[in-house]
Amino acid sequence: MGKSSKDKRDAYYRLAKEQAWRARSAFKLLHLDETFNLLGPDVHRVVDLCAAPGSWSQVLSRVLIKGECLGRRAWEAKTRRDRRALVAGIEELEKQLKKEEMEDESYELDDEGLRPREGVRIVAVDLQPIAPLEGVERLVADITHAGTIPKILKLLDGEEVVQGTEEAKDESKRQPVDLVISDGAPDVTGLHDLDIYIQAQLLFSALNLAIRVLKPGGKFVAKMFRGKDVDLIYAQLRCFFGKVTCAKPRSSRASSLEAFVVCEDFQMPKGFKPEEELPLGIGGQVRLPKRDQKTRAERSEAFVDGQRRSVREDGVTVIEFENGDEEDEAAESRWIAPFVACGDLSSWDADATYHLPSDHVSLDPIQPPTNPPYKKALEERRRKGGLYGKTKK
């Protein structure tokens, strides 16, 4: 996150610098955590896909490794303080407010204090290198490539589990992952249909990886663009997860098609085996056991020549037509996920701009991009005098 931005008065852009986050996207994960408790006490093993520059991995490090009070934990601590203040009265409330003014809100403690977790393993994967983070294993790899999964398992479980081919295939020796998150997005072209399609394929690449490493009951979070046929994506996700929700964090601009699909309660469908040669994706199908043919036969007995007639109490004749199996399967493959707005709705608005204070000072980025792909283009532009010859060398 550099000095240039769409608008320097963006509240979350400035808060990210003030609170030492690598990017404003850290607030998106925090807002999702407040609503869905993604980083609950049972989460110890996490895979962060498309992680650069590392803001989501930074949240994982500060919550799981350092035990800081952020996200849902901070929201619950604030709720308890508000309740105690109401019981204690106005005097106690004033004392509490004075005390909070002297403390950094991002490091607020609850009654139990900071408790770093034991046995935490975090793996961050991206095509671009990521600057070091405490307790985070970094991997430069392509999530769309089948060879990335053994590398992730190697970092999660150690050499002794995935060193040999037979051991790698033995799933009983693996320690599955509690949570898989992905904040990746392609370089947008401005052609919305194309951008939505590419983003959906990136989501399915993350899903193909997640179903191979998630434990039963695990969670999966990924960025998506809400398009015309987004319910088809929900339907395929519902084959693997008991609950699928479309979430919009407060820090995500309402003017953007961006949203996050939060999938909970992972269960591998009976009879389904992931295949590297036929990965899930747009236009693909989840191969599940066929439905009971006896049920279909019983249902079709009431139809004569493909239709059934019945007479209502008011004397009107109702004609029902029998749908074919293909039409039934198509109807069952579409499903609409509930939409949830995450984060405190009274907090900063991502689409609004705010006046800067008179003593405003431009802050340096917390972590400059590590070998960005556009670095060579910038150097070439400076060498030629910049755009229209106005950029200083």
Image: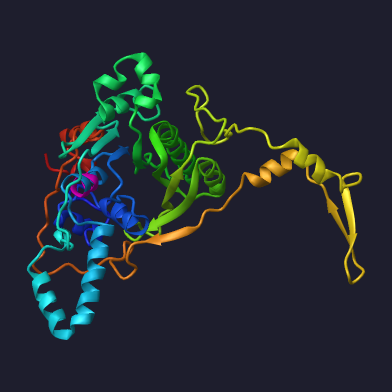
What secondary structure prevails in the magenta region? Answer: helix
Q: Is residue 324 left or right of residue 182?
A: right
Q: Is residue 257 left or right of residue 336?
A: left
State which region is magenta: 58-63
Check the image and report above or below for 125 versus 14. above
**Residue 378 appears anywhere in the view:** yes
Q: Quadrant of the C terminus?
A: top left
Residue at the image point whose x is 18% and y is 48% from the top: 62
Most distant residue in the bottom direction: 90
Q: Is residue 255 left or right of residue 63?
A: right
Describe the colour scheme in one phrase. rainbow
Q: Is residue 182 magenta?
A: no
Q: Quadrant of residue 54?
A: top left
For the image, the number of numbered tags is 0
Residue at the image point whose x is 28% and y is 58% from the top: 72
Residue 91 on image: x %, y %:
13, 84
